[in-house]
């Protein structure tokens, strides 16, 4: 499982390397924090490759999913404020308990 240290890393070190890989992927996207660190993209997945080396396919999938979830959470941070800014401010609720406000 995830706790096995088959590739030379402990589970805690594997999680740290996954988080490191995700942070490097986030910073490799253009104009993140006003800067362009595109060069990081060339090495951003190396920690993930080190973690998944000699792992069972299920464990490698789980580690990759962890990196993907963290990375996309950081990359797509702007979606939530955009939806709130573009959408209705709140759903009106009738005092009788109905939804809509008609």
Image (spheres, grey):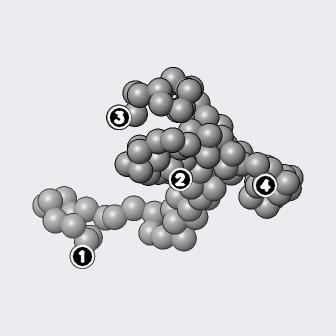
* Residue drawn at (41%, 50%) of the image: 57
Q: Nearer the viewer, mark 4 or mark 1?
A: 4
Above or below 3: residue 59: below
Which label lies toward us, 3 or 1? Answer: 3
Most foreground residue, 81 or 26: 26
Is 96 on the left or on the right of 50, as rendered? left
Q: Nearer the viewer, residue 73 or 64?
A: 64
- Residue topped by disc 4: 42
According to the image, label 3 marks what residue? Answer: 1
Q: Position of residue 40 (x, y in %)?
A: 80, 50
The answer to which image quadrant residue 76 occupies is bottom right
Circle 2 crowding by C-alpha within 10 Å: few under 14, some 14–19, many from 20: some
The answer to whether any part of residue 100 appears in the image is: yes
Residue 102 image label: 1
From mark 4 to mark 1, how far is it between C-alphas?
A: 56 Å
Q: Nearer the viewer, residue 66 or 54?
A: 54
Q: Which residue does the numbered mark 2 point to in the structure image?
A: 68
Q: What residue is shown at x 53% (from left), y 32% (from top)?
A: 7
Q: Residue at the bottom extreme?
A: 102
Residues under labels 4 and 3: Cα distance? 29 Å
Numbered disc 3: secondary structure: loop
The x, y position of residue 35, in whole percent, is 86, 52
Q: For this view, does 33 lie left or right of residue 94?
A: right
What residue lies at 40% left-to-right and 33% top-to-bottom?
2
Circle nearer the N terminus (4, 3): 3
Q: CA distance from mark 3 to mark 1?
A: 55 Å
Establish if 36 lies above or below 87. above
Q: Is residue 66 among what the camera can see?
A: no
Measure how far apart labels 2 and 4 are at the Cα level.
16 Å
Label 4 neighbour load within 10 Å: few <14, some 14-19, many 20+: few
For label 2, the SS is helix
């Amino acid at each position: 499982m995830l706790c096995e240290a088959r590739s030379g890393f402990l589970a805690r070190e594997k999680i740290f390397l996954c988080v490191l890989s995700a942070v490097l992927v986030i910073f490799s996207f253009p104009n993140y924090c006003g800067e362009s660190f595109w060069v990081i993209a060339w090495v951003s997945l190396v920690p993930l490759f080190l973690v998944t080396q000699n792992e069972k396919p299920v464990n490698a999938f789980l580690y990759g999913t962890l990196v993907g979830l963290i990375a996309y959470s950081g990359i797509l941070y702007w979606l939530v404020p955009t939806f709130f800014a573009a959408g209705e401010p709140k759903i009106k609720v009738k005092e009788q308990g109905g939804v809509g406000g008609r």
